């Protein structure tokens, strides 16, 4: 009996060593690793799917999650990170709302020996040892794909193409990178001109509001809307319709994410193309967490595979979309 008990205890200690261990207030270690995750908020369909994917993958893998919603505020994310450090979690993961301003808190995590994994968005820090890896999309390439789609869809010999752009959150990696990638492609052709560009903060409501302002301010025709995400495009579609115009026809629209709402808008002929940005990165996060706990090396950048979808593919693709 006693021998059986000792064997069970030894086995659970060994399992705890392999899995990694969290530290409770008394300094004892628990078998289930604890991960503190700071999410940006719930600003888009994409973000909701991203949160669901992370929560379900971590639960399946038996990793305890301490989740914090920052409501799109960097100060809330910094507070959450500090609270995870104080709780002495085993790992921290977060999706940084903007690129800059993380150096101090990341140094605090490093000093406490808590590894940090970035998901979705990058940070701008001078020392890249402050995080283990970044799991997420290539936003510059997404911007390029939107630009390439527009070039291909514009007949040769057409005149000037007047574009308005709805940018994502100011200072965020996807807003900066998607703009860069899009310009890299369209600036090579003098017909394409971005006549207005403003942030719609990745939300439907803001996308609608800014598009209304664009339509009021522009006396000449707007040919194309490039929206940094589908939610802003969906908000803008409403503004375009309320202005008595036909989205997808009078104004061509290309956006980024590939959420179900975008596929429905394409099916209805109101959106022309969406560039996929895959939010389902929960399993990749679990793999990275396991690698960190088992002290296996990880690449500094873990990319996510993505495609491009147009109106003619929408009806066939919609039933299979997972977000
Ligand atoms: O960082 C990814 C972006 O953030 C998605 O494109 C957008 O929908 C989200 O809010």
Image (cartoon, rainbow, N blue to C red):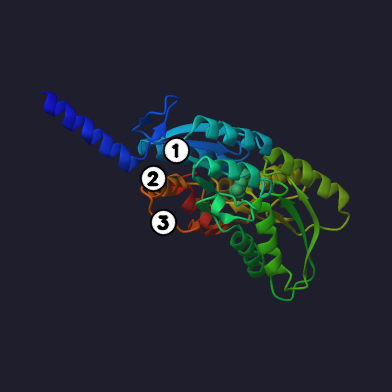
Marks 1 and 3 close (CB-CB < 8 Å):
no
Instruction: Tell me the SS state at disc 2.
Output: helix
Pick the quarter of the image with the N terminus: top left
Write down the quadrant of residue 83 in the picture. Answer: top right
Q: Would you place residue 151 above or below residue 234 in this image?
A: below
Observer-nearest of 12 and 47: 12
**Residue 320 in the image, given as x and y percentages of width and height:** 44, 48
Q: Answer with left or right where residue 138 lies relative to residue 180.
A: left
Q: Residue at x 64, y 49 (%)?
A: 229
Q: Earlier in the sequence, mark 1 or mark 2?
A: 1
Observer-nearest of 122 and 169: 122
Q: Residue most toward the bottom? A: 157
Instruction: Tell me the SS state at disc 1.
Output: loop
Write down the quadrant of residue 61 in the picture. Answer: top left
Write down the quadrant of residue 163 in the picture. Answer: bottom right
Q: Answer with left or right where residue 57 lies relative to residue 242.
A: left
Q: Residue at x 36, y 48 (%)?
A: 294
Residue denoted by label 1: 90
* Cα distance between the residues tagged 1 and 2: 8 Å
Q: Would you place residue 156 above or below residue 34 in this image?
A: below
Q: Would you place residue 242 above or below residue 154 in this image?
A: above
| Residue 293 disc label | 2
* Cα distance between the residues tagged 2 and 3: 10 Å
Marks 1 and 2 close (CB-CB < 8 Å):
yes
Residue denoted by label 3: 297
């Amino acid at each position: 009996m006693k021998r059986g008990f000792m064997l069970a205890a030894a086995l659970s200690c060994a399992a705890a060593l392999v899995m990694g261990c969290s530290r409770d207030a008394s300094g004892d270690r628990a078998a289930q690793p604890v991960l503190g995750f700071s999410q940006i908020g719930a600003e888009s369909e994409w973000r909701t799917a991203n949160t669901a994917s992370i929560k379900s993958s971590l639960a399946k893998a038996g990793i305890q999650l301490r989740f914090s919603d920052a409501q799109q505020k960097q100060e809330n994310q910094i507070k959450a990170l500090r609270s995870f450090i104080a709780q002495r979690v085993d790992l921290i993961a977060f999706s940084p709302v903007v690129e800059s301003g993380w150096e101090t808190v990341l140094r605090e995590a490093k000093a406490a020996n808590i590894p940090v994994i970035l998901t979705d968005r990058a940070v701008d820090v001078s020392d890249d040892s402050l995080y283990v890896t970044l799991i997420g999309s290539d936003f510059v390439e997404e911007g390029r794909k939107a630009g390439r789609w527009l070039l291909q869809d514009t007949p040769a010999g057409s005149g000037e193409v007047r574009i308005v752009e709805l940018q994502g959150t100011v200072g965020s990696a996807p807003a900066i990178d998607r703009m860069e990638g899009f310009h890299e492609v369209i600036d090579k052709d003098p017909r394409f001109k971005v006549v207005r560009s403003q942030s719609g903060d990745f939300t439907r409501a803001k996308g609608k509001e800014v598009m209304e302002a664009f339509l009021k301010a522009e006396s000449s025709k707007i040919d194309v809307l490039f929206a940094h995400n589908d939610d802003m495009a969906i908000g803008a579609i409403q503004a375009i319709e309320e202005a008595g115009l036909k989205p997808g026809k009078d104004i061509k629209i290309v956006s980024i994410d590939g959420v179900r709402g975008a596929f429905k808008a394409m099916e209805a002929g109101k959106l022309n193309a969406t560039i996929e940005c895959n939010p389902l990165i929960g399993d990749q996060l679990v793999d990275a967490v396991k690698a960190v706990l088992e002290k296996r090396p990880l690449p500094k950048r873990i990319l996510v595979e993505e495609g491009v979808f147009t109106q003619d593919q929408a009806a066939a693709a919609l039933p299979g979309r997972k977000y």
